[in-house]
Image: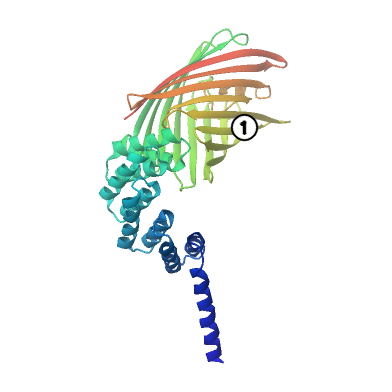
Amino acid sequence: MRIFSLVVYICLLSSTVFGQEHLSSDDLFKEARKAAFDRKDYPEAIRLSRMALAKSPDYADIRIFLGRVYTWSDKVDSARAEFQYVLQRQPEYEDAYVAITDLEYWNNRSTEALQYTEKGLSYHPRSEDLLLRKAKVLASLKRLPEAAATANMLLSVNPSNAAGRSLLNNIKDQVRRNKIDLSYDYTYFDRRFDQPWHLLSLTYSRQTKLGTVAGRINYANKFGDGGVQGEIDAYPHISNTFYAYVNLGYSGSDIFPKYRSGFSLYANLPRSFEAELGFRYLYFSSSTWVYTASVGKYYRNFWFNLRTYLTPGENNLSKSFHFTTRYYTAGADDFIMLGVGTGISPDDQRNNINYAINTDLMTYKLAAAWQRTFARQNILGLYGTWYYEEYQKNTYGNQFNIGVSLMRRF
């Protein structure tokens, strides 16, 4: 019986091998990928790849895949030989430069990896894969200004590249950990108030190992009266998926909330989505709790965000909705913004005193902004918002806000 079983096994094995020998190189490549990705059977993937290359020696995709499997199997010399075979015959082949860069980088040969990225980029200067790898390699070599410039170049090609954005933030943490932001906002009312509002803010923020921490002083003049508010913001990093926003503020003036606080939990989701859940707390003469949720999406050079604020009242639930889109013109700090919405935002320091006045009334708004980096470390921003607000029941007026900000990283 054992002899019979052995004969059957040998026959089945022979038929399998015989059948594979008659498969095309594409079919063998498909089977090799299944072995590697579905079953993690790297020896089988190597065997099938070599069979495919026996039929089609210059099939570059199969040879690069074989080199990848050799890399994952710690067969460094074999992997390098496969990649170089492709580059000798097809010196412009982008995937080969990506693969051999990974091989050298993972084996602590950053100088060699950088040479391959630069050679590949000479043929493909807008390659996202090569730009990302070059930035990583430069960062590993502690050539941080060059790494930041390369990451910014990647984001100018594709602002929705989440890996590039994350890498740039990490590089900035190491290079320029500090930022000062001075901003001024002017608000004009055509009917509601006789005097315009003014808001001047000075913010200092610093990148830390835990995330960004910022301190802010706001000075406002509203209703002919001046007042000061102090705030602290923090954006602690929790994991590769989650980060948070935390806010605390205090003012002794009636034109700001006496106390304010906020918390949001953000999640980086697949396919360049981001989601948020949180709350805001404002205390004037009484407490106001506001709950917020948002969803964002990066698509090519665009970022879209839909946010709602929900404010429970005694007899109703006040709702506001805000839709914002940004078009990135270059790096992470360079964009054009347009927004539409209804209701009041508790995060808008120019306008959140309205929570003490008219949270139950309707407001419509249109917003636009432009922000641009100049002289490498400076950022100029221009902002404008039009509000059509119901300041008394069924009585509307226009409110116009214009603002300017100047930021400097150092």
- Whether residue 357 is visible: no
Q: Secondary structure at mark 1?
A: strand
Q: Nearer the viewer, residue 145 or 63?
A: 63
How crowded pointer 1 is (Cα within 10 Å; few <14, some 14-19, many 20+) is rated as: many
Render colour scheme: rainbow
- Whether residue 212 is visible: yes
Q: Quadrant of the N terminus?
A: bottom right
In the picture, residue 154 is in which quadrant?
Answer: top left
Q: Nearer the viewer, residue 317 or 67?
A: 67
| In this view, 66 is above or below 365 | below
| In this view, 11 is above or below 264 | below
Q: Amino acid at mark 1?
A: Tyr
In the picture, residue 123 is in which quadrant?
Answer: top left
Q: Nearer the viewer, residue 25 or 257?
A: 25
In the picture, residue 236 is in which quadrant?
Answer: top left
Residue 402 location, x and y as percent? 50, 15
| In this view, 239 is above or below 300 | below
Residue 67 location, x and y as percent? 37, 59
Residue 287 location, x and y as percent? 60, 30
- Residue, disc 1: 309
Residue 73 location, x and y as percent? 38, 64
Seen at 45% across and 38% down, the residue is 235
Q: Would residue 349 be found to the left or right of residue 137 on screen?
A: right
Q: Nearer the viewer, residue 22 or 7?
A: 22
